[in-house]
Amino acid sequence: MQYSERYLHLGERIDLDTHVVCKYRVKTSTMSMEEAAAAIATEQSTGTWTDLVTLEEDVFEKYGAKVLEIDGDMATIAFPEDDFSIDVGGVPQILSIIAGNLFGLGDLEGVRLEDVVFPRSIIDQFPGPKIGVDGLRKTLERPEKPLVGTIVKPKIGLSPKATADYIMECGRGGLSNSKDDETLVDQSFCPIEDRTVAIAEALDTLKDEGHHMVHAINISTSGHRIVELAERVQELGASQIMVDVLTAGFAAVQALAEDPSIKLPVHVHRTMHGAMTRNPDHGIAMLPIAKLCRMCGGDALHIGTLGVGKMRGVCKEDLENRDACLDGSVPYKPVMPVCSGGLHPGMVKKLVDIAGFDSQIQAGGGVAGHPGGVRKGAMAMAQAVDAAYLGVGLEEYARDHPELAAALEKWGSL
Ligand code: CAP
Ligand code: MG
């Protein structure tokens, strides 16, 4: 028997509550699925490319990963919970095991981590969201309707005042949310402190007018500076913060969620995820990323646009991401699922019908590209969400909502 075949435990029953259980889609033409899965289990736990004279039997038995099932091109592999570091390892160490060297194994043509289920011992080490869906809804005084937001466009180049003016227009048009774009943090044309203050003033004015809205300030920066930057923008009146989780790291989100001084909801953007999620044969699906974001404490997370919009996505996978955000069997607060990317009012009804009311629908171009300007663009988005909430067709709703009618005329509807 091949050395790695010792890691095959097909059909055996193990205590799943003491293991991290992963599903990998494997592409291989030179090896059998059994050999390929065993190679992953070997490399990611107690083995390597050859047998080891240093591997004692009891170490192999305690810490060796186990291939539990092969179903077509899907392999289920369980890692004993004791392979994982207690407290200090966090997501970096978890990912080094479940999503590490395996992607580079030369004998495999491709591997995609499709799902992961964590045991209670690991779940309990993470904070989960501080604020979550209910907290966001409470702040916005919007108990049931889907949230409706914008991304300030153009994504770079606006001054703090122009940004605040844009947000004011969006608030007056009825949007509940807005956010910085993923590439904006603290450039000279829009310093973060000045931007935060200008936006806080705009949001205060809106509040005085009776409209509640939050704006996520993008604080994505180096790990050793992110909590300090969050504290600073909080002091200056920020209502929400945003982190580009894959460029800043999961640990950045966790640091913010675990720091008691940070009271703001964390909007999690997933820029760069396409490098991992896009290839169906290789990489990491969004589902494990979504689960990790919830564990680390994201309060809102981009899940995709259910097969519409400008970004490539698979509706079934996006719905799994949504479920990972809201799953009631997980002992964390639910995360607000965010649909964003190439959306406009004509897509909203279809999106809400599929995603449900616990969702945040966002449009950048779909607001700032409205022929009547930003306020009318915001009105059209808000009207589209209202129509979806009321169960009325967009064309019908547009009959006495001219802003929505203008958007449908420009972009059409689904
Ligand atoms: C949307 C967006 C978001 C994408 C990211 C953008 O703007 O601001 O970053 O939603 O995609 O720059 O594309 P538009 P995802 O509304 O103008 O398209 O949520 O899939 O990660
Ligand atoms: Mg963006």
Image (tube, rainbow, N blue to C red):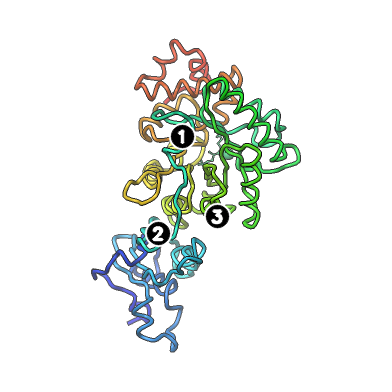
Q: Position of residue 200 (x, y in %)?
A: 63, 32
| Res. 162 in view | yes
Q: Position of residue 268 (x, y in %)?
A: 52, 45
Q: CA distance from mark 1 to mark 3?
A: 24 Å
Quadrant (top left/top right/bottom left/bottom right) for the N terminus: bottom left
Q: Are marks 3 and 2 in contact (CB under 8 Å)?
A: no
Q: Is residue 252 above or below residue 354?
A: below
Please name the residue that numbered disc 2 is placed on: 124
Q: Is residue 184 above or below residue 92?
A: above
Q: Earlier in the sequence, mark 1 or mark 2?
A: 2
Q: Would you say the beta carbon of the disc 3 residue lies within 8 angstroms of ligand 1?
A: no
As helix, strand or loop, the secondary structure at mark 3 comes to: helix
Q: Earlier in the sequence, mark 3 or mark 2?
A: 2
Please name the residue that numbered disc 3 is placed on: 255
Q: Would you say the beta carbon of the disc 1 residue lies within 8 angstroms of ligand 1?
A: no
Identify the image quadrant of residue 352. Answer: top left
Relative to residue 153, is residue 75 drawn left or right? left
| Res. 103 in view | no
Label 3 sits on what residue type? Ala
Please name the residue that numbered disc 1 is placed on: 360
Q: Earlier in the sequence, mark 1 or mark 3?
A: 3
Quadrant containing ligand 1? top right
Give the label on residue 51, or none. Answer: none
Q: Which residue is farthest right?
A: 188
Label 2 sits on what residue type? Asp
